[in-house]
Image (cartoon, helix red, strand yellow):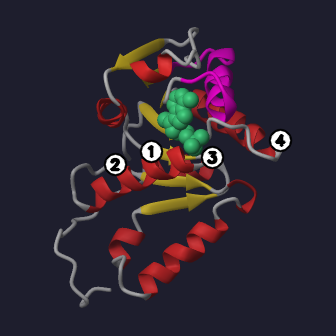
Amino acid sequence: MNPLKNICVYCGSSPGRLDAYTVAARALAEALVSRNIGLVYGGASIGIMGAVADHMLRLGGKAVGVIPEALMRKEVAHYQLSELHVTQSMHERKTLMAELSDGFIALPGGLGTLEELFEIWTWAQLGFHGKPCGLLNVEGYYDPLIEFLDHAQAEQFIRRSHRAMLIVESQPESLLDRFGAYETPIVEIWVGKDEI
Ligand code: AMP
């Protein structure tokens, strides 16, 4: 079992169309707090980001934000967090979020969420870290993306072992159980057609 002390959550700076997204963000916060796992996230007070952090704090959990100075100035930062790290750049921010975390979960979100998820998954593919990456597929939000990933694998642009690194569940407890049992695969950077 992997000791999961802190989990990084990528998620929308918007609330999304359905209340179910916010409900799922709160359910994830509950699952984290019940396992004594801290939250690392983008440090904003808005959207799903604000919902997950607010609920962590409401439940007495730890919520650590990492935000670049430029976004601080836009006054979206959450000032009640357990810790708020302010970085000079987005790159520095994402590096620090990765260093502080033992695993990465994407809740529903937009471009920022997708970019963060794909970057951290790519780093796993390259063997730069061995931490679990997962999707919390709330209300089938990620179904079209999962379908596309299957297509990309079938077309031999994503290796089966790399595709398998992304853990997909619709319930936070199941996702965290699988994170706890995650075994880092041995990765090869070279991608040939043999294993696909
Ligand atoms: P999006 O999914 O496009 O709403 O972007 C959300 C993701 O990008 C979050 O996980 C954040 O890390 C980052 N992000 C985007 N917008 C903001 C914001 N206004 N404040 C802080 N982080 C943000």
Residue at disc 2, secondary structure:
loop
**Badge 1 is on which residue?**
104
User: Which residues make up the magenta segment?
Assistant: 44-64
Q: Tell me which label, 2 or 3, sits earlier in the chain.
A: 2
Marks 4 & 2, CB-CB < 8 Å contact: no
**Badge 2 is on which residue?**
131
**Badge 3 is on which residue?**
172
Cα gap from disc 4 to disc 3, whole angstroms: 17 Å
Residue at disc 3, secondary structure:
helix
Amino acid residing under circle 4: Asp
Q: Tell me which label, 4 or 3, sits earlier in the chain.
A: 4
Between 171 and 144, which is closer to the camera in this rendering? 144
Expressed as whole percent of the image width and height from the top left, the position of residue 42 reads 49, 29
Cα gap from disc 2 to disc 3, whole angstroms: 17 Å
Residue 51 is one of the magenta-drawn residues: yes
Amino acid residing under circle 3: Pro
